[in-house]
Amino acid sequence: MRQATPLTAVIALPLFLLFLSSTGSHAHNITTILATNPEFSTFNHYLTLTHLASEINRRLTITVLAVDNAAMSSLLSKHLSLYTIKNVLSLHILVDYFGSKKLHQITNGTALTATMYQATGAAPGSSGYVNITDLKGGKVGFGAADNGGTLDAVYVKAVHEKPYNISVLQISQVLTSDEAEAPTPGPSDLNLTAILSKQGCKAFANLLLSSGADKTFQENVDGGLTVFCPTDTVINGFMPKYKNLTAPQKVSLLLYHGIPVYQSMQMLKSSNGVVNTLATDGANKYDFTVQNDGEEVTLKTKVVTVKITGTVKDEEPLVVYKIDKVLLPRELFKVAPTAPAPKAPKAKAKGKAEAPAEADAPADDTVGDQTADNNGVGGMDGGRLVMVFLSFCMGVLVL
Protein backbone atom coordinates (compact mmCIF):
# COMPACT_ATOMS: atom_id res chain seq x y z
CA MET A 1 0.00 0.00 0.00
CA ARG A 2 1.29 3.45 -0.98
CA GLN A 3 2.34 5.54 1.96
CA ALA A 4 0.95 9.03 2.54
CA THR A 5 3.03 11.80 1.07
CA PRO A 6 5.09 13.46 3.82
CA LEU A 7 4.01 17.01 4.63
CA THR A 8 7.54 18.28 4.03
CA ALA A 9 7.44 17.03 0.45
CA VAL A 10 4.07 18.71 -0.15
CA ILE A 11 5.24 22.14 0.94
CA ALA A 12 8.83 21.88 -0.30
CA LEU A 13 8.11 22.27 -4.01
CA PRO A 14 6.12 25.54 -3.84
CA LEU A 15 8.63 26.97 -1.38
CA PHE A 16 11.48 26.02 -3.68
CA LEU A 17 9.80 27.61 -6.71
CA LEU A 18 9.16 30.73 -4.64
CA PHE A 19 12.86 30.82 -3.82
CA LEU A 20 13.76 30.64 -7.49
CA SER A 21 11.40 33.47 -8.38
CA SER A 22 12.82 35.64 -5.59
CA THR A 23 16.27 35.46 -7.15
CA GLY A 24 15.04 37.21 -10.30
CA SER A 25 16.06 40.70 -11.36
CA HIS A 26 14.82 43.75 -9.46
CA ALA A 27 15.06 45.80 -12.67
CA HIS A 28 12.43 48.43 -13.35
CA ASN A 29 11.93 50.88 -16.20
CA ILE A 30 10.29 54.18 -15.30
CA THR A 31 9.78 55.11 -18.96
CA THR A 32 7.78 51.94 -19.60
CA ILE A 33 5.78 52.37 -16.39
CA LEU A 34 4.72 55.92 -17.22
CA ALA A 35 4.11 55.16 -20.91
CA THR A 36 0.90 53.33 -19.97
CA ASN A 37 -0.42 56.55 -18.41
CA PRO A 38 -0.70 59.28 -21.09
CA GLU A 39 -1.52 61.94 -18.49
CA PHE A 40 2.16 61.77 -17.44
CA SER A 41 3.63 61.98 -20.96
CA THR A 42 5.29 65.39 -20.42
CA PHE A 43 6.77 64.35 -17.08
CA ASN A 44 7.99 61.12 -18.69
CA HIS A 45 9.52 63.04 -21.61
CA TYR A 46 11.53 65.31 -19.34
CA LEU A 47 12.77 62.42 -17.19
CA THR A 48 14.32 61.04 -20.39
CA LEU A 49 15.57 64.41 -21.64
CA THR A 50 17.38 65.17 -18.37
CA HIS A 51 18.79 61.60 -18.07
CA LEU A 52 16.96 61.17 -14.76
CA ALA A 53 15.13 58.13 -16.14
CA SER A 54 18.37 56.14 -16.47
CA GLU A 55 19.36 57.13 -12.92
CA ILE A 56 15.97 55.99 -11.58
CA ASN A 57 16.33 52.66 -13.37
CA ARG A 58 19.76 52.08 -11.81
CA ARG A 59 18.51 52.56 -8.25
CA LEU A 60 17.51 49.53 -6.18
CA THR A 61 15.02 51.50 -4.09
CA ILE A 62 13.26 54.62 -5.33
CA THR A 63 10.01 56.61 -5.13
CA VAL A 64 8.93 58.87 -7.99
CA LEU A 65 6.47 61.69 -7.31
CA ALA A 66 4.86 62.08 -10.73
CA VAL A 67 2.85 65.09 -11.85
CA ASP A 68 0.40 65.22 -14.74
CA ASN A 69 0.67 67.24 -17.95
CA ALA A 70 -1.22 70.25 -16.53
CA ALA A 71 1.20 70.52 -13.59
CA MET A 72 4.19 70.20 -15.95
CA SER A 73 2.78 73.00 -18.12
CA SER A 74 2.86 75.25 -15.07
CA LEU A 75 6.54 74.41 -14.53
CA LEU A 76 7.47 74.89 -18.19
CA SER A 77 5.78 78.30 -18.26
CA LYS A 78 8.62 79.56 -16.03
CA HIS A 79 11.02 79.08 -18.99
CA LEU A 80 13.74 77.45 -16.90
CA SER A 81 16.81 75.93 -18.51
CA LEU A 82 16.88 72.17 -19.02
CA TYR A 83 19.51 71.81 -16.28
CA THR A 84 17.35 73.76 -13.83
CA ILE A 85 14.33 71.63 -14.75
CA LYS A 86 16.51 68.61 -13.97
CA ASN A 87 17.10 69.95 -10.44
CA VAL A 88 13.37 70.55 -9.94
CA LEU A 89 12.45 67.05 -11.12
CA SER A 90 15.28 65.55 -9.03
CA LEU A 91 13.41 66.93 -6.02
CA HIS A 92 10.51 64.63 -7.01
CA ILE A 93 12.63 61.47 -6.82
CA LEU A 94 12.93 60.13 -3.26
CA VAL A 95 15.84 57.82 -2.51
CA ASP A 96 13.67 55.65 -0.25
CA TYR A 97 10.53 53.56 -0.73
CA PHE A 98 7.17 55.14 0.07
CA GLY A 99 4.20 53.05 -1.01
CA SER A 100 0.63 54.35 -0.58
CA LYS A 101 0.27 52.36 2.65
CA LYS A 102 3.51 53.69 4.14
CA LEU A 103 2.35 57.30 3.60
CA HIS A 104 -0.26 56.84 6.32
CA GLN A 105 2.09 55.02 8.71
CA ILE A 106 4.79 57.69 9.08
CA THR A 107 6.18 57.88 12.61
CA ASN A 108 4.82 60.98 14.41
CA GLY A 109 2.87 61.82 11.27
CA THR A 110 5.69 63.57 9.41
CA ALA A 111 8.99 62.63 7.78
CA LEU A 112 11.88 64.42 6.10
CA THR A 113 13.33 62.31 3.30
CA ALA A 114 16.30 62.79 0.97
CA THR A 115 15.85 63.18 -2.77
CA MET A 116 18.03 62.67 -5.82
CA TYR A 117 18.60 66.44 -5.82
CA GLN A 118 20.27 66.13 -2.43
CA ALA A 119 22.21 63.03 -3.51
CA THR A 120 23.93 64.93 -6.36
CA GLY A 121 25.61 67.28 -3.89
CA ALA A 122 24.19 70.28 -5.78
CA ALA A 123 21.59 71.10 -3.13
CA PRO A 124 22.84 73.42 -0.36
CA GLY A 125 21.69 72.90 3.22
CA SER A 126 18.35 71.12 3.56
CA SER A 127 17.05 72.14 0.12
CA GLY A 128 17.42 68.58 -1.20
CA TYR A 129 14.90 67.15 1.27
CA VAL A 130 11.12 66.76 1.04
CA ASN A 131 8.67 66.94 3.93
CA ILE A 132 5.91 64.31 3.89
CA THR A 133 3.06 64.89 6.38
CA ASP A 134 -0.05 62.82 7.11
CA LEU A 135 -2.90 65.35 7.14
CA LYS A 136 -6.45 65.37 8.49
CA GLY A 137 -9.09 63.63 6.42
CA GLY A 138 -6.75 60.99 5.01
CA LYS A 139 -4.70 63.42 2.91
CA VAL A 140 -0.90 63.41 2.68
CA GLY A 141 1.01 66.63 1.97
CA PHE A 142 4.37 67.12 0.26
CA GLY A 143 6.67 70.15 0.35
CA ALA A 144 10.33 71.05 -0.22
CA ALA A 145 12.20 71.47 3.07
CA ASP A 146 13.46 74.92 2.01
CA ASN A 147 9.94 76.21 1.31
CA GLY A 148 9.21 77.52 4.79
CA GLY A 149 7.20 74.45 5.81
CA THR A 150 4.63 74.97 3.05
CA LEU A 151 3.14 71.76 1.69
CA ASP A 152 2.64 72.54 -2.02
CA ALA A 153 1.12 69.28 -3.13
CA VAL A 154 -1.05 66.44 -1.87
CA TYR A 155 -1.08 62.74 -2.67
CA VAL A 156 -3.49 61.84 -5.49
CA LYS A 157 -3.06 58.13 -6.21
CA ALA A 158 -0.60 55.26 -6.60
CA VAL A 159 0.43 54.78 -10.23
CA HIS A 160 2.73 51.76 -9.76
CA GLU A 161 4.13 49.91 -6.74
CA LYS A 162 6.67 47.12 -6.51
CA PRO A 163 7.64 46.76 -2.83
CA TYR A 164 10.32 47.61 -1.96
CA ASN A 165 11.99 48.53 -5.23
CA ILE A 166 9.96 51.25 -6.89
CA SER A 167 6.87 53.28 -6.11
CA VAL A 168 5.35 55.82 -8.51
CA LEU A 169 2.90 58.16 -6.77
CA GLN A 170 0.95 61.01 -8.35
CA ILE A 171 0.99 64.31 -6.47
CA SER A 172 -1.22 67.29 -7.29
CA GLN A 173 1.45 69.76 -8.46
CA VAL A 174 5.15 70.46 -8.82
CA LEU A 175 7.05 71.11 -5.56
CA THR A 176 8.36 74.65 -5.14
CA SER A 177 11.99 75.26 -4.17
CA ASP A 178 13.96 78.48 -4.67
CA GLU A 179 17.26 76.57 -4.64
CA ALA A 180 16.13 73.95 -7.16
CA GLU A 181 14.76 76.65 -9.46
CA ALA A 182 17.91 78.81 -9.28
CA PRO A 183 19.80 79.22 -12.61
CA THR A 184 21.99 76.15 -13.17
CA PRO A 185 25.01 76.08 -15.50
CA GLY A 186 25.06 73.50 -18.26
CA PRO A 187 27.88 70.94 -18.52
CA SER A 188 29.94 73.19 -20.81
CA ASP A 189 29.85 75.90 -18.17
CA LEU A 190 31.22 73.61 -15.48
CA ASN A 191 34.85 74.34 -14.66
CA LEU A 192 36.33 70.89 -14.03
CA THR A 193 39.66 72.11 -12.62
CA ALA A 194 37.82 74.45 -10.24
CA ILE A 195 35.69 71.54 -9.02
CA LEU A 196 38.80 69.41 -8.49
CA SER A 197 40.64 72.19 -6.66
CA LYS A 198 37.84 72.58 -4.12
CA GLN A 199 37.62 68.85 -3.39
CA GLY A 200 41.15 67.83 -2.39
CA CYS A 201 42.43 67.36 -5.94
CA LYS A 202 44.15 70.72 -6.47
CA ALA A 203 47.53 69.16 -7.30
CA PHE A 204 45.95 67.02 -10.02
CA ALA A 205 44.04 70.05 -11.36
CA ASN A 206 47.29 72.02 -11.55
CA LEU A 207 48.91 69.23 -13.59
CA LEU A 208 45.97 69.28 -16.01
CA LEU A 209 46.34 73.04 -16.46
CA SER A 210 50.13 73.10 -16.81
CA SER A 211 50.15 70.25 -19.35
CA GLY A 212 47.17 71.50 -21.38
CA ALA A 213 45.32 68.21 -20.79
CA ASP A 214 42.46 70.13 -19.14
CA LYS A 215 41.18 71.16 -22.60
CA THR A 216 40.59 67.53 -23.61
CA PHE A 217 38.77 66.80 -20.36
CA GLN A 218 36.60 69.90 -20.73
CA GLU A 219 35.72 69.09 -24.35
CA ASN A 220 34.30 65.71 -23.27
CA VAL A 221 32.00 66.94 -20.49
CA ASP A 222 28.94 67.48 -22.72
CA GLY A 223 29.04 63.94 -24.12
CA GLY A 224 29.68 62.31 -20.75
CA LEU A 225 32.88 62.13 -18.68
CA THR A 226 34.21 60.08 -15.76
CA VAL A 227 37.32 61.40 -13.99
CA PHE A 228 39.52 59.51 -11.52
CA CYS A 229 41.35 62.02 -9.36
CA PRO A 230 44.41 61.13 -7.22
CA THR A 231 44.36 63.20 -4.02
CA ASP A 232 46.92 65.91 -3.30
CA THR A 233 48.94 63.63 -1.00
CA VAL A 234 49.15 60.96 -3.70
CA ILE A 235 50.21 63.42 -6.42
CA ASN A 236 52.85 65.02 -4.20
CA GLY A 237 54.42 61.62 -3.54
CA PHE A 238 54.35 60.76 -7.24
CA MET A 239 56.00 63.98 -8.52
CA PRO A 240 59.59 62.58 -8.76
CA LYS A 241 58.37 59.96 -11.28
CA TYR A 242 56.15 62.47 -13.07
CA LYS A 243 59.06 64.86 -13.67
CA ASN A 244 60.99 62.12 -15.47
CA LEU A 245 58.32 61.86 -18.17
CA THR A 246 58.44 63.76 -21.45
CA ALA A 247 55.74 66.37 -22.15
CA PRO A 248 53.68 64.01 -24.42
CA GLN A 249 54.00 61.23 -21.84
CA LYS A 250 52.72 63.54 -19.11
CA VAL A 251 49.65 64.36 -21.21
CA SER A 252 49.00 60.67 -21.90
CA LEU A 253 49.31 59.83 -18.20
CA LEU A 254 46.81 62.53 -17.23
CA LEU A 255 44.35 61.58 -19.99
CA TYR A 256 44.58 58.01 -18.69
CA HIS A 257 42.59 59.25 -15.67
CA GLY A 258 39.47 59.99 -17.74
CA ILE A 259 36.81 57.84 -19.45
CA PRO A 260 34.83 59.57 -22.25
CA VAL A 261 31.46 58.30 -20.92
CA TYR A 262 29.44 58.88 -17.77
CA GLN A 263 29.86 55.95 -15.35
CA SER A 264 27.99 56.19 -12.05
CA MET A 265 29.14 54.00 -9.17
CA GLN A 266 26.30 51.59 -9.82
CA MET A 267 27.30 51.37 -13.48
CA LEU A 268 30.91 50.65 -12.56
CA LYS A 269 29.80 47.86 -10.22
CA SER A 270 27.52 46.25 -12.79
CA SER A 271 29.80 46.49 -15.84
CA ASN A 272 33.15 45.12 -14.74
CA GLY A 273 35.69 44.73 -17.51
CA VAL A 274 38.18 46.54 -19.71
CA VAL A 275 37.52 50.22 -20.47
CA ASN A 276 39.23 52.65 -22.82
CA THR A 277 40.38 56.06 -21.62
CA LEU A 278 40.91 59.54 -23.05
CA ALA A 279 44.50 58.47 -23.77
CA THR A 280 43.48 55.51 -25.98
CA ASP A 281 44.80 55.98 -29.52
CA GLY A 282 44.62 53.02 -31.90
CA ALA A 283 47.34 50.51 -31.02
CA ASN A 284 48.17 52.53 -27.91
CA LYS A 285 45.37 50.97 -25.86
CA TYR A 286 45.82 52.85 -22.59
CA ASP A 287 43.04 50.78 -21.03
CA PHE A 288 42.47 49.32 -17.58
CA THR A 289 40.08 46.87 -15.94
CA VAL A 290 37.24 47.81 -13.59
CA GLN A 291 36.35 45.21 -10.98
CA ASN A 292 34.45 45.23 -7.71
CA ASP A 293 34.33 43.17 -4.55
CA GLY A 294 31.07 44.05 -2.86
CA GLU A 295 31.03 47.82 -2.37
CA GLU A 296 34.74 48.26 -3.13
CA VAL A 297 35.60 49.19 -6.71
CA THR A 298 39.15 48.90 -8.03
CA LEU A 299 40.86 49.89 -11.28
CA LYS A 300 43.49 47.39 -12.35
CA THR A 301 46.28 48.13 -14.84
CA LYS A 302 49.17 45.81 -15.69
CA VAL A 303 51.28 47.94 -13.35
CA VAL A 304 49.15 48.85 -10.34
CA THR A 305 45.76 48.28 -8.68
CA VAL A 306 43.96 51.44 -7.57
CA LYS A 307 40.96 51.78 -5.25
CA ILE A 308 38.14 54.33 -5.53
CA THR A 309 37.91 56.03 -2.13
CA GLY A 310 35.11 58.55 -2.64
CA THR A 311 32.91 60.59 -4.98
CA VAL A 312 33.71 64.26 -5.58
CA LYS A 313 30.78 65.02 -7.89
CA ASP A 314 28.09 62.90 -9.53
CA GLU A 315 25.69 64.78 -11.74
CA GLU A 316 25.19 63.32 -15.18
CA PRO A 317 26.96 63.84 -17.57
CA LEU A 318 29.94 64.36 -15.21
CA VAL A 319 31.17 62.17 -12.37
CA VAL A 320 34.47 62.56 -10.49
CA TYR A 321 35.95 59.95 -8.12
CA LYS A 322 38.90 60.13 -5.72
CA ILE A 323 41.46 57.31 -5.96
CA ASP A 324 44.24 56.21 -3.62
CA LYS A 325 47.04 55.91 -6.22
CA VAL A 326 48.05 57.29 -9.58
CA LEU A 327 46.87 55.10 -12.49
CA LEU A 328 50.00 53.81 -14.24
CA PRO A 329 49.55 52.55 -17.84
CA ARG A 330 51.72 49.74 -19.15
CA GLU A 331 52.57 51.94 -22.14
CA LEU A 332 54.62 54.22 -19.86
CA PHE A 333 55.66 52.13 -16.88
CA LYS A 334 57.21 48.72 -16.32
CA VAL A 335 54.66 45.94 -15.91
CA ALA A 336 54.60 44.51 -12.41
CA PRO A 337 56.41 41.12 -12.40
CA THR A 338 54.45 38.01 -11.47
CA ALA A 339 55.88 35.78 -8.76
CA PRO A 340 57.26 32.49 -10.20
CA ALA A 341 55.71 29.28 -8.93
CA PRO A 342 57.90 27.66 -6.25
CA LYS A 343 59.79 24.53 -7.23
CA ALA A 344 58.43 21.25 -5.96
CA PRO A 345 60.58 19.84 -3.10
CA LYS A 346 62.80 16.86 -3.91
CA ALA A 347 61.44 13.49 -2.88
CA LYS A 348 63.02 11.94 0.19
CA ALA A 349 64.80 8.64 -0.24
CA LYS A 350 63.31 5.18 0.37
CA GLY A 351 59.65 5.69 1.05
CA LYS A 352 60.05 8.76 3.22
CA ALA A 353 58.91 11.14 0.52
CA GLU A 354 56.23 13.63 1.48
CA ALA A 355 53.54 14.91 -0.85
CA PRO A 356 54.79 18.10 -2.52
CA ALA A 357 53.22 21.27 -1.24
CA GLU A 358 50.63 22.75 -3.58
CA ALA A 359 52.18 25.52 -5.69
CA ASP A 360 50.64 28.98 -5.74
CA ALA A 361 48.63 29.67 -8.87
CA PRO A 362 50.36 32.07 -11.30
CA ALA A 363 49.04 35.61 -11.34
CA ASP A 364 46.31 36.14 -13.91
CA ASP A 365 45.71 39.58 -15.39
CA THR A 366 42.43 38.60 -16.97
CA VAL A 367 39.35 39.51 -14.97
CA GLY A 368 36.10 37.72 -15.70
CA ASP A 369 33.03 36.33 -14.00
CA GLN A 370 33.87 34.30 -10.92
CA THR A 371 32.94 30.61 -11.22
CA ALA A 372 30.90 29.22 -8.38
CA ASP A 373 32.06 26.25 -6.32
CA ASN A 374 30.94 23.17 -8.24
CA ASN A 375 30.78 21.14 -5.03
CA GLY A 376 27.76 23.08 -3.75
CA VAL A 377 24.47 24.50 -4.90
CA GLY A 378 26.25 27.56 -6.28
CA GLY A 379 28.02 25.36 -8.84
CA MET A 380 24.76 24.21 -10.47
CA ASP A 381 22.86 26.25 -12.96
CA GLY A 382 19.16 26.90 -12.31
CA GLY A 383 17.97 24.09 -14.64
CA ARG A 384 20.10 21.38 -13.00
CA LEU A 385 19.08 22.51 -9.53
CA VAL A 386 15.39 22.33 -10.38
CA MET A 387 15.77 18.88 -11.96
CA VAL A 388 17.59 17.54 -8.89
CA PHE A 389 14.95 18.90 -6.57
CA LEU A 390 12.03 17.62 -8.66
CA SER A 391 13.64 14.17 -8.87
CA PHE A 392 13.86 14.11 -5.10
CA CYS A 393 10.21 15.11 -4.72
CA MET A 394 9.03 12.51 -7.22
CA GLY A 395 10.95 9.86 -5.33
CA VAL A 396 9.24 10.85 -2.11
CA LEU A 397 5.81 10.85 -3.78
CA VAL A 398 6.35 7.33 -5.17
CA LEU A 399 7.14 6.14 -1.65
Image: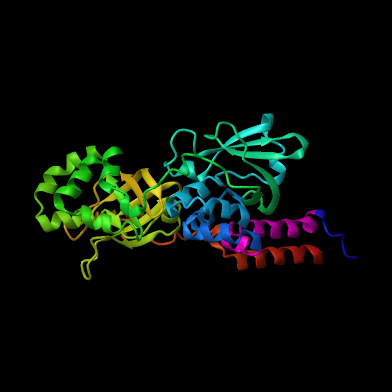
Foreground residue, 332 or 82?
82
State the image coordinates of residue 8 (x, y, percent, origin top left): 78, 54
Decide whether the magenta segment is chiefly helix, strand or loop.
Answer: helix
Which color scheme does this rendered protein use?
rainbow
Position of residue 151 in the picture relative to residue 362 (left or right): right
State the image coordinates of residue 246 (x, y, percent, origin top left): 9, 55
- Residue 321 appears in the figure: yes
Q: Is residue 297 above or below residue 202?
A: below
Foreground residue, 377 or 200?
200
Q: Quadrant of residue 284?
A: bottom left
In the image, which residues are magenta? 8-36
Foreground residue, 166 or 209?
209
Position of residue 112 in the picture relative to residue 105 (left or right): left
The residue lying furthest to the top in this view is: 108
State the image coordinates of residue 380 (x, y, percent, origin top left): 56, 63
The residue lying furthest to the bottom in this view is: 282
Q: Residue at x 33, y 56 (%)?
A: 225
Q: Residue at x 17, y 47 (%)?
A: 207
Foreground residue, 272 or 159?
159
Q: Is residue 103 above or below residue 47?
A: above
Q: Residue at x 52, y 34 (%)?
A: 146
Question: In which quadrant of the rendered image does the C terminus lie?
Answer: bottom right
Assess whether residue 223 is covered by the magenta stretch: no
State the image coordinates of residue 184 (x, y, percent, origin top left): 40, 47
Mark count: 0
Question: In which quadrant of the rendered image does the N terminus lie?
Answer: bottom right
Assess whether residue 34 is covered by the magenta stretch: yes
- Residue 357 appears in the figure: no
